[in-house]
Image (tube, helix red, strand yellow):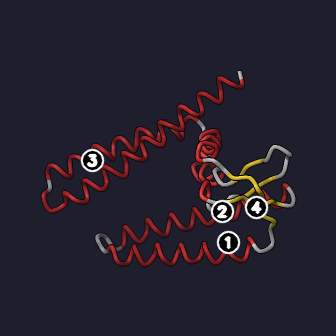
């Protein structure tokens, strides 16, 4: 499956009794019961569309306004505000579940949804960006902070992708 399908899958879970649950805040909050599989498919589709549009607009802002961090910060606030308002209206119609989503469950779900090719690509790309951040840090004194921040961010991304590769491998071994 694709990248955004993997991101989206980390917010959904099937409970022990077969109910479909949605976790709008991931592992940081409670789940909400979805009435049917059609509701789950529809919500997955909408959450994925929001993620795609949000990421595309973020990338567009980064490219159109390089080093204008106030514009990027304003976009992050607007985007987050939209999600909060959307969830406020959506969650009023859903029943709260007692179950929680653990960070490990979320990561395992994402790892299985991404597939090995996406995980390996993400790992390698993240490591290349870590190297780029290190090179920028060492070679451009006026960009050293950007290089350091980029290297740290993509280092965390690489660690997450490697963790998901391990989780996916474990899941495959348990199923075999």
Q: How far apart are the two marked residues, 4 and 2, measured between alpha carbons?
A: 8 Å
Q: Which residue is mark 2?
A: 24
Splitting the image into 4 quarters, where does residue 36 fall? bottom right
Instruction: Look at the numbered disc 3 and give the secondary structure of its residue.
Output: helix
Residue 102 vertical placement versus 116 (above, below): below
Residue 89 vertical placement versus 18 (above, below): below
Horizontally, is 19 left or right of 90 in the view? Answer: right
Q: How far apart are the two marked residues, 3 and 4, measured between alpha carbons?
A: 41 Å
Kindly identify the residue that appears in the image at 80 percent across and 53 percent down. 20
Q: Which residue is mark 1?
A: 87
Q: Which residue is mark 4?
A: 32
Q: Tell which circle, 3 or 1, labels the residue nearer the N-terminal end.
A: 1
Q: Tell which circle, 4 or 2, labels the residue nearer the N-terminal end.
A: 2
Q: How far apart are the two marked residues, 4 and 1, measured between alpha carbons?
A: 11 Å
Marks 4 & 2, CB-CB < 8 Å contact: yes
Q: How many marks?
A: 4
Q: Tell which circle, 3 or 4, labels the residue nearer the N-terminal end.
A: 4
Q: Which residue is mark 3?
A: 132
Quadrant (top left/top right/bottom left/bottom right) for the C terminus: top right
Q: Tell which circle, 1 or 2, labels the residue nearer the N-terminal end.
A: 2
Q: Characterize the local packing of mark 3: few (<14), some (14-19) or many (20 or more) Cα atoms within 10 angstroms.
A: some
Q: How far apart are the two marked residues, 3 and 1, measured between alpha carbons?
A: 37 Å
Instruction: Look at the numbered disc 2 and give the secondary structure of its residue.
Output: loop
Residue 22 x %, y %: 72, 58
Marks 4 & 1, CB-CB < 8 Å contact: no
Residue 173 vertical placement versus 117 (above, below): above
Residue 53 x %, y %: 56, 67
């Amino acid at each position: 499956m694709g990248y955004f399908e993997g991101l989206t899958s980390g917010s959904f879970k099937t409970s022990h009794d077969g109910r479909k649950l949605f976790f709008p805040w991931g592992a940081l909050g409670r789940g909400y019961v979805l009435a049917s599989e059609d509701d789950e498919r529809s919500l997955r589709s909408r959450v994925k569309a929001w993620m795609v549009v949000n990421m595309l607009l973020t990338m567009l802002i980064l490219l159109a306004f390089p080093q204008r961090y106030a514009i990027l910060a304003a976009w992050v606030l607007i985007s987050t505000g939209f999600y909060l308002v959307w969830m406020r209206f959506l969650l009023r119609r859903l029943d709260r579940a007692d179950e929680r989503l653990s960070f490990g469950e979320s990561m395992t779900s994402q790892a299985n949804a991404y597939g090995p090719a996406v995980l390996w690509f993400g790992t390698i790309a993240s490591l290349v960006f870590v190297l780029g951040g290190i090179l920028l840090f060492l070679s451009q004194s006026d960009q050293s902070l950007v290089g350091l921040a980029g290297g740290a961010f993509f280092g965390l991304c690489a660690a997450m992708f490697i963790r998901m590769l391990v989780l996916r491998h474990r899941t495959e071994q348990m199923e075999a």
